[in-house]
Amino acid sequence: MQYDYLIVGAGLFGATVAHEMKKKGKKILVIDKRNHIAGNVYTKKIEGINVHQYGAHIFHTNNKEVWNYINQFAEFNRFTNSPVANYKGELYSLPFNMYTFNKMWGCVTPEEAKNKIEEQKKEAGITAPKNLEEQAISLVGTDIYEKLIKGYTEKQWGRPCTELPSFIIKRLPVRLTFDNNYFNALYQGIPVGGYTKMVENMLSGIEVKLGANYLENKESFNEMADKVIYTGPIDAYFEFKLGTLEYRSVRFENELLNIPNFQGNAAVNYTDSETPWTRIIEHKWFEFGKDEEGNDLPKTVISKEYSSEWKPGDEPYYPVNDEKNSQLYEKYKVMAEKEEKVLFGGRLGEYKYYDMDAVIASALRISRGLY
Ligand code: UDP
């Protein structure tokens, strides 16, 4: 065997395992079918701005081990995610907090906001939420559900909120304080110089082959190494034998504008159902402090995000972790466990709506057990 480990996919999961196994003295080859490393966290510099080519990635975690780990490879800036919701021209603060409640209902005190939510929840008659719609209403009431959640979620997932699992909306904090920080995380930031540079550092000294399609030459690739770490879609690995898992895909329309400031914020979510895109990202605001030095770039790059159902040939982004797909995944998982030399990991390999920190935590856990 030429290598101890063949790692399929140069995203965060693959890069973490590669780094850890190299530390253990193993000989590693990382391959990726794309012509660049870093998977979906890939950033590319355009006009001095690091553009998140596969959608906004804001690193946030409560896991100190993961935070210390990732800080070996990059310095993180002090970016705090606070997206704005645009509902037919009305702007609201996200996540749902006192600023949102004040704008929506004129509430001034936390007590008033709490009562308003309770009143709307009671009117809707929800006691034990069974799906995303009921979960949302019981968290923030019907007005916020109608204006800030329903349209956005149905565009994002292409399914009615009544058919979506409630855990998706529980990703968002609800606060009775004036706090627009989108994440409940102790540590947060964007790597200075971009994610690509960070992953490059993780892969330093490791052999990487780009434009290499594992699934097209599985047998010959498998002959190259003792063990394989596969981070692609689990159903594709098994040639969709049991059927296809559903994913959401995202299409980005990037524009370079000759103005210094398009929307004054990194992310604006369009929460109505008529606007075809879900959000617009203005990449420079991930890096340059507002109204601070460096804010004078005459240009800006924006990306409109359009969500769609994944079909063969598209990039899979979000696993649809509803009942039907979860059941199918469990069957693939049984098959995966029988593959002697192949381990499956990451958002696609485990069909899981993982955040970046959870991907790294999982990769570190798996690496600890590998020799
Ligand atoms: N969401 C919403 N309105 C918003 C932002 C988010 O209804 O303005 C809901 C939507 O269902 C989304 C979920 O919250 O899928 C999780 O949002 P998050 O920002 O975590 O999604 P991601 O950044 O992973 O796309």
Image: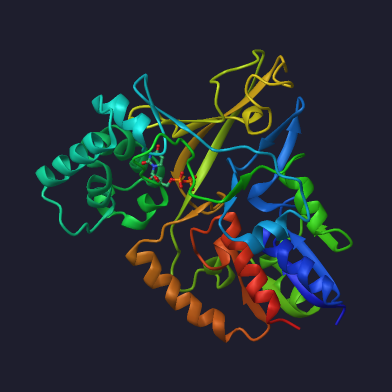
Where residue 143 sits in the image (x, y, percent)? 23, 34
Where residue 62 sits in the image (x, y, percent)? 56, 57
**Front one among 91 and 313:** 91
Residue that appears at 81% across and 52% down: 200
Residue 36 visible at all = no
Q: Tell me if 32 is positioned left or right of 328 in this view.
A: right
Q: Tell me if 309 is positioned left or right of 60 in this view.
A: left
Q: Tell me if 325 is positioned left or right of 119 in this view.
A: right
Residue that appears at 27% across and 35% down: 144
Quarter of the image with the C terminus in it: bottom right
In the rendered view, would you say 18 is above or below 48?
below
Where residue 43 sits in the image (x, y, percent)? 70, 41
Quarter of the image with the N terminus in it: bottom right
Q: Quadrant of residue 237?
A: bottom right
Colour basis: rainbow
Q: Tell me if 279 is positioned left or right of 341 in this view.
A: left
In the rendered view, would you say 232 is above or below 4?
above
Where residue 18 sits in the image (x, y, percent)? 77, 67
Residue 138 visible at all = yes
Q: Quadrant of residue 121?
A: top left
Quadrant of the displayed image that contains ligand 1: top left
**Front one among 340 and 300:** 300
Residue that appears at 45% across and 63% down: 245
Residue that appears at 77% across and 39% down: 193
Count the labels in the image: 0
